[in-house]
Each structure stands twice: as structure tokens, then as C-alpha cells.
Image (cartoon, grey):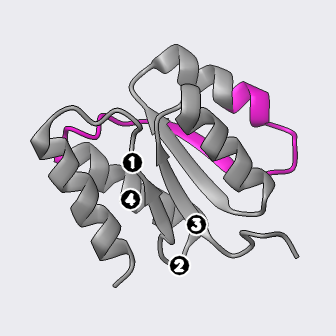
Amino acid sequence: MKEFDGKVAIVTGTTGIARGIAIRLASAGARVMACGVDAAANRELQRETDGKGIALRVDSCDVSRPEQVQAIIASTIEKYGGSISSPIPPPSTRSEMRWRLIQKLGIDAWR
């Protein structure tokens, strides 16, 4: 059994630290939805992880847009079922609105 078997995570970002977190979680057994605004980085992460036997899906999402966040949550639940174990916020959250939204997602995920 792997460290994160049975867990579902949303990682916001497909570059830098977020990219590493997404790959690490998926390699350790989590089912991961990674999402970001950089279309080229999104495609590259998906290409890199396809065929490696890990559950990592990449999609586009701007976390400052609540409707896109809701769509990613719905898509993740539809793809992987169950509930989201842990949303991973972007490493550089700049606006207060984004920070509050991410905190709410984190708290609601554990209810």
C-alpha cells in the first residue's frame, strides 16, 4: 500500500513547487487533479505523467474565479469519485479574495 492510496487531491498550479507536489502525491498513490492557468505548462505536465501508471489529470483553472474553482471540484469528484481529501493552494497567493477562497476550500474539504 502506498502512502496516499485512496486520497484525492487538487493541486492548484502546474509549475514549480505545485508541479512537484502533484507528481509526488500521484506517485504515492493519490488521485490528483492539477490545474493551472499556464496552458503550455498544463500540457507538459500531462504529457510527462501520461503512461506512468499514476492517476494525475491536468486541467485549466484560474483560482481567482469562483466558477472555475467549482468546476474543477465537480470535475475532480466526477473523475475520481468520493470526496476531496486535500486541496493544495498555490504557493504564491497574492490577493485576499483568493486566500479566503482557498482557506474556505481547505476547511470545507475536511467537513
Tell me the distance, in whole angstroms, between the alpha carbons under discs 3 and 2: 8 Å
Q: Quadrant of the N terminus?
A: bottom right
The type of residue carrying mark 1 is Pro
The label nearer to you, 2 versus 1, is 1
**Magenta span:** 46-66
Q: Residue at x 75, y 72 (%)?
A: 5
Q: Nearer the viewer, residue 53 or 64?
A: 64
User: What label sits on residue 73 in the rendered view?
Assistant: 4
Q: Residue at x 53, y 43 (%)?
A: 34
Tell me the distance, in whole angstroms, between the alpha carbons under discs 3 and 1: 14 Å
Q: Residue at x 51, y 72 (%)?
A: 85
Is residue 35 found inside the magenta-colored segment of the image?
A: no
The type of residue carrying mark 4 is Ile
Q: Can see residue 55? A: no
The type of residue carrying mark 2 is Gly
Q: Quadrant of residue 29?
A: bottom right
Mark 2 and mark 1 lie on one chain; the one further toward the N terminus is 2
Q: Residue at x 39, y 79 (%)?
A: 110
Q: Position of residue 104 (x, y in %)?
A: 22, 64
- Drawn side of residue 100 relative to residue 21, left or right: left
Mark 3 and mark 4 lie on one chain; the one further toward the N terminus is 3
Vertical placement of residue 44 versus 65, above or below: above
The type of residue carrying mark 3 is Val
Q: Can see residue 24? A: yes
Mark 3 and mark 2 lie on one chain; the one further toward the N terminus is 3
Q: Which residue is mark 2?
A: 82
Mark 4 residue crowding within 10 angstroms, few (<14) / some (14–19) / many (20+): some
The label nearer to you, 3 versus 2, is 3
